Every structure is written in structure tokens, then in C-alpha cells.
């Protein structure tokens, strides 16, 4: 993704989600409350949404942040029959906790400290049930970016990641386990957890590694813009294998509105995932 698209993504415009990711075969996305896999639900607790500070308001009496957001249908002109069209779309990118105060996301999500300072990192932005979104977030689940520890965004080798330090220790979430050496194998099963199209947390499994390249691997993950920075897990080990960074087109026009772009489960090149082992600073954590 080029720098222009990144900047647009951070302004919450419609085109922020227009040129990434796709559905492969069946749509495997589920809300956290609807997941039947307790391991995936546990992993989701340590994932976070990048939400612009202008979209959140702090209530001092209740010590909560109120998220302001349009629905997916309104924000992206999604058709009324599109899945999750009535849910809020607030997140620009996704991220995940790797230590008590370090968080990983995509390099194109945060280019500099100006980007860092524009957004909160929000845990527990999810659906409570089919109709109720958790839009009032406890203060203890909202964090700021204190410092960029390491970042890469290369058009040459397509390396894309950012490691940031949060403004304080995250005491109520468990850091995720991640691979520190070696590489995942072609065909290994995967699950991705993040915020497709800015939606509340979604879990999407049923994917596998299609190919491996120098700095990334590709997989048939059901992901969208907003999933950038999402943790991609090895189903067998529960460890983070990489960071979701690129993919095919999200939506296609369907008359006067838009629907998810769908292709065969084994079609296309797949979504690109930066190897977590590319982040050298994580080796000693």
C-alpha cells in the first residue's frame, strides 16, 4: 500500500478500505461473542483497535471513552444485505500486545509520531451480542502511543511492520506468544483476529499458508482494510506468525452500493503477512 493510501486511511475516508483484502470461499469472520473456540476468544483479548482520538470522547464521571462511529453501511456504502452492515465502523487499523507495554501493528498504519499522537489503541472494542456494540470503553482499556521502537515500510522487499511503546503498562491483558525463530510451513492452518473495515473485533479462521517469500507469506485469509496490523496466528501452536499488511480488493460495486469481493478459496495470490520474526527487537522479549 502506498503512502497516499495510508494517509487517507488515517482520515477515516471511504477509500481507506477500498484496495485491500478479500473473502476467499466462505466468509469465516465471526464476532467474539459468537465464536465457539475458547482459545481464539482468549487470544482476541490481547488485540486492539487503532481509533482516531477525534472519534472518542472521555467521560470523567464514568471514566469511560465513548466511541463515535457511523455504521459500515453508511461509512463504506455497503449494501443493506452485506454482513455486519449495521455494525459501527470506527477502527483504522489493528494491533496486538507482545509485552506488558509493547504493541505491534503494520508499518503503514503508523509512519511517524504525528500518526502516533492522532490515535488511541483500544482493547475490548467488540460486539457484546448480535445488536449491541461495546462503544463505551473503560479507561483502563484505552492507551496512547508513547514511542515508535522500530518500523519498516519498504516498497523493495515489502517489509511492513511497526513496534510501538504504549504510554503505560497494560496490566489487565496477557501479551501474546509469538514465533522467535524459523518459519511457518506452507499449508499450515491460520486464524486472524482484528478489525475488518473498522468493525468490532472479528475472528476469521479456515485459512492456510499458500506461499512463502523473503519478508512475508501469503494466505487465503478473509481480511479487509482495517485488518492491517492484525495478528495472524498458527492454529496448531497459538503463536503469532505475522502481521496482516496487504491483499486483494475488499469490495465491488453492486448497483448503487457495495458488496464484499469474493473469490474461490484456493484462487488468487492470497493476503500478505509480514513475518513476526522480521522485528529484531522482539527476540529478547
Image: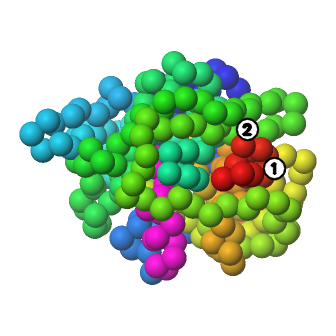
Is 81 or 13 nearer to us in this picture?
13
Tell which residue pokes out farthest to the right in this image.
Answer: 214
Structural crowding at the residue carrying mark 1, measured as other residues with C-alpha within 10 Å and reported as few (<14), some (14–19) or many (≥20): many
Q: Position of residue 147 (x, y in %)?
A: 55, 29
Is 97 or 125 nearer to us in this picture?
97
Residue at (79, 38) in percent of width and height: 159
Q: Is residue 227 above or below residue 131?
A: above
Task: Give the residue pinned by disc 2.
Answer: 160
Mark 2, secondary structure of its residue:
strand
Q: CA distance from mark 2 to mark 1?
A: 9 Å
Tell which residue pokes out farthest to the front in this image.
Answer: 284
Structural crowding at the residue carrying mark 2, measured as other residues with C-alpha within 10 Å and reported as few (<14), some (14–19) or many (≥20): many
Residue at (51, 66) in percent of width and height: 43
The quarter of the image holding the N terminus is top right
Numbered label attached to residue 249: none
Q: Position of residue 38 (x, y in %)?
A: 46, 79
Residue at (28, 55) in percent of width and height: 133
Q: Count up the numbered dots.
A: 2
Residue at (90, 48) in percent of width and height: 214
Numbered label attached to residue 216: 1
Q: Tell whether position 91 is magenta.
A: no
Q: Which residues are magenta?
A: 37-49
Mark 1, secondary structure of its residue:
strand
Residues under numbered marks 2 and 1 in contact, where contact means CB atoms less than 8 Å apart? yes
Amino acid at each position: 500500500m502506498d503512502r497516499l493510501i495510508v494517509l487517507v486511511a488515517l482520515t477515516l475516508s471511504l477509500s481507506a478500505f477500498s484496495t485491500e483484502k478479500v473473502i476467499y470461499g466462505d466468509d469465516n469472520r465471526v464476532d467474539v461473542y459468537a465464536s465457539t473456540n475458547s482459545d481464539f476468544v482468549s487470544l482476541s483479548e490481547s488485540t486492539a483497535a487503532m481509533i482516531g482520538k477525534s472519534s472518542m470522547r472521555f467521560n470523567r464521571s464514568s471514566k469511560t471513552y465513548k466511541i463515535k462511529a457511523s455504521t459500515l453501511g453508511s461509512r463504506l456504502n455497503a449494501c443493506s444485505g452485506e454482513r455486519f452492515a449495521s455494525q459501527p465502523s470506527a477502527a483504522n487499523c489493528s494491533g496486538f500486545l507482545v509485552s506488558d507495554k509493547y504493541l505491534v501493528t503494520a508499518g503503514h498504519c503508523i509512519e511517524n509520531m504525528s500518526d502516533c499522537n492522532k490515535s488511541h489503541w483500544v482493547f475490548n472494542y467488540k460486539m457484546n451480542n448480535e445488536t449491541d456494540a461495546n462503544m463505551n470503553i473503560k479507561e483502563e482499556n484505552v492507551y496512547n502511543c508513547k514511542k515508535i521502537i522500530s518500523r519498516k515500510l519498504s516498497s523493495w522487499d515489502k517489509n511492513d511492520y511497526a513496534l510501538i511503546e504504549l504510554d503505560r503498562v497494560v496490566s489487565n491483558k496477557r501479551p501474546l506468544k509469538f514465533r522467535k525463530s524459523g518459519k511457518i510451513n506452507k499449508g499450515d492452518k491460520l486464524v486472524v483476529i482484528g478489525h475488518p473495515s473498522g468493525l468490532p473485533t472479528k475472528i476469521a479462521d479456515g485459512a492456510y499458508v499458500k506461499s512463502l517469500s523473503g519478508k512475508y507469506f501469503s494466505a487465503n485469509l478473509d481480511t479487509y482494510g482495517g485488518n492491517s496490523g492484525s495478528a495472524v496466528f498458527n492454529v496448531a501452536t497459538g503463536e503469532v506468525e505475522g502481521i496482516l499488511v496487504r491483499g486483494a480488493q475488499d469490495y465491488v460495486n453492486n448497483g448503487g452500493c457495495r458488496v464484499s469481493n469474493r473469490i474461490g478459496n484456493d484462487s488468487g495470490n492470497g493476503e500478505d503477512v509480514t513475518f513476526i520474526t522480521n522485528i529484531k527487537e522482539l527476540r529478547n522479549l
